[in-house]
Amino acid sequence: MVAKLFLKSLLMWGKLFFTSFRCETCSKEEAKYRCPRCMKYSCSLLCVKKHKLALSCNGVRDKTAFVSVNEFTDLNLLSDYRFLEDVGRTADAAARHCFFKCLYFFQLYCLRNKARGCNIELKTLPVGFTKRRENSTTFNSMENKFYWHLKLIFPHCHAEYTLKGVPDDKILADILKPYIDPVESDPVVCQRLKIYTTSPQSDVRILMKIENRNRNSVRYNELDASRSLRDNLKGKVIIEYPTLFVVLKTLKNDMVVLGQGEHVFIFCYVILGYLSYLNNS
Ligand SMILES: [Zn+2]
Ligand SMILES: [Zn+2]
């Protein structure tokens, strides 16, 4: 309110002040404007344009220009006040940005730490990676559980689904129900994943890629559908979020799958076919 009154009186004062000056461009009319940069008086937009052209003036006030105490007017005071306000705003925005950045890294650190507490080695990617951007995993301290971002890949149908906020105590079979259960699955999904819904549930295998292995020796762990996500992720390395491959053991292709123990099962799945599909798409 005080600032408004101050501005109003300043404008009135400015009007009175300008009427006593002639336009410095045409020297005919009374001045209405004063250039914030070169302080020339003008009567109209035309004269403002002319003075800019003649003096190569951009008309933008030099906020940091030196003004001697003798020439220091109320306008300079207002200008300095606004300049300081701008500086304050910029500094504030920078501090806020820094704060959120610190908060972001602290949250990531906590997430990895909590995962370590559950015997899961969670690795996060640098900012800019798609998986980093996608990952919506959170940890609820009150409930002491993870709500995972989860990707389900059905290689036989070239289909993949992203799930968000999957509680870590949910049984794997229940997570898959809306996709492959002949009764409980969504009709549209059921149609797309027909090969799964029509197969005996005992043929379904859930695999997770073993991270930190050589590119040419890709292996998969088989997960236990009757156990929770948390139990299944124990002792595993996860990059950002779990990606589960749902495969049928009856459909064969060349793929070596490592069991949960040290046994090696040779299940031949169509994962290679899916990977080549990914490459082609
Ligand atoms: Zn003029
Ligand atoms: Zn000017």
Image (tube, rainbow, N blue to C red):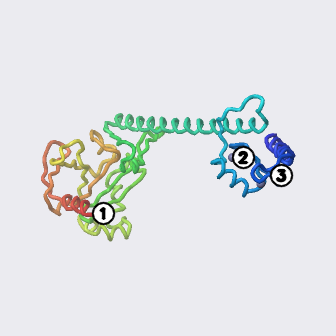
Mark 2 surroundings: few (<14), some (14-19) or many (≥20) residues within 10 A: some
The disc labelled 1 sits on which kind of residue? Ala
Instruction: Measuring from the top left, give residue 32's x and y in whole percent.
Output: 80, 51
Mark 3 or mark 2: name the one nearer the start of the chain: 3
In the picture provided, is 187 more to the left or to the right than 31?
left
Q: Quadrant of residue 7?
A: top right
Identify the mark nearer the N-term, 2 or 1. Answer: 2
Judging by the rendered image, the residue that carries numbered circle 2 is 35
In this rendering, the count of numbered labels is 3
Q: Position of residue 277 (x, y in %)?
A: 24, 63
Position of 243 with respect to 98 (left or right) is: left
Q: Is residue 222 above or below residue 191?
A: above
Q: CA distance from mark 1 to mark 3?
A: 76 Å
Query: Which quadrant holds the C terminus?
Result: bottom left
Q: Position of residue 129 (x, y in %)?
A: 36, 47
Res. 159 mark? 1
Among numbered discs 1 and 3, the one appearing first in the sequence: 3
* Numbered label attached to residue 89: none
Asked whether disc 3 touches disc 2, contact meaning CB atoms under 8 Å apart, the reply is no
Regarding residue 202, the answer to whether it shows in the image is no
Q: Is mark 2 within 8 Å of ligand 2?
A: yes
For residue 41, side relative to residue 193 (left or right): right
Return the residue nearer the eye: 22 or 196: 22
Q: Amino acid at mark 2?
A: Cys
Q: Residue under label 3, please give it.
A: 30
